[in-house]
Amino acid sequence: MTRAETKERNRRALLDAARRIVARDGYRARLEEIAEEAELTTGAVYSLFGSKNGLLIALVTDYLGPHYESAEAIPASLDVLETVDAFARHYRGLCEDPDALRHLSFEISLQDLALRDPELRPRLAASVRAHEERLAVLLAGRSHDAAPLTLRQARRLATALRGLLVGLSQGAILGLTDAASGDYFAAAARALVTPEVLGPP
């Protein structure tokens, strides 16, 4: 195994271990236990991530990635409403993952950690903003009302979509509503495409 392969294997092992420990222990998660779970040392955490917070930020990116990476495969030929519809259905599909409840527990625990740690909070916010920007780039330039959506409008829509879909997916995972089908997610998301949400070009 090459040095790069070993580094990536250790990185993955620490991320997987941290996800399990943070989902279980929340803000009480200990770096030593994460390293032990990954069968590595705390030195490996510092070498690969710089700090415990660096590991947690990498966890956020790792967690949010699937929500947005698959969406980037949405065909460029779709207009804004069709794209929003497809993204909402994709997001709803993630709720059916067998590990969705564990992922939600991890997400809530990570937010709890960020609320308690003033260093982690802005880094978590920056990571979320970076993923919103990926969605905005996906939306920008697509046709809406016979004009391309500007990046400014796409950013406003991306923020609204993230807020809506995070809330709906939490409800779906927790079983709070029987109506949270893919059609419901898509209809709610399309309803955001209004002049009030988009704002001026």
Image (spheres, rainbow, N blue to C red):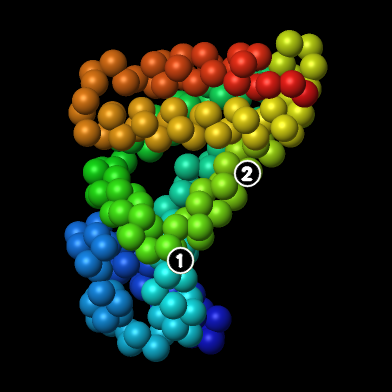
The circle on residue 96 is none
Is label 1 or label 2 in front? 1
Instruction: Name the image quarter holding residue 173.
Output: top left
Cβ atoms at labels 1 and 2 below 8 Å apart: no
- Residue type marked 2: Arg
**Element marked by disc 1:** loop
From the top left corner, tell me how far across and down residue 200 is, in percent.
74, 21
Q: Specify the quadrant that holds the C terminus.
A: top right
Instruction: Name the image quarter holding residue 178.
Output: top left
The circle on residue 119 is 1
Q: Is residue 120 left or right of residue 112?
A: right
Q: Which residue is mark 2?
A: 134
Instruction: Name the image quarter holding residue 159.
Output: top right
Q: Residues within 10 Å of mark 1 (few under 14, many from 20)?
A: few
Question: Furthest residue to the top?
Answer: 145
From the top left corner, tell me how far across and down residue 157 is, in percent.
60, 28
Q: Is residue 172 left or right of residue 161?
A: left
In this view, the residue in front, 173 or 159, is 159
In this view, the residue in front, 195 or 139, is 195
Q: Work out how far the residue at label 1 is from the one at label 2, CA to CA, in angstroms.
A: 24 Å
Residue 5, visible in the rendered structure: yes
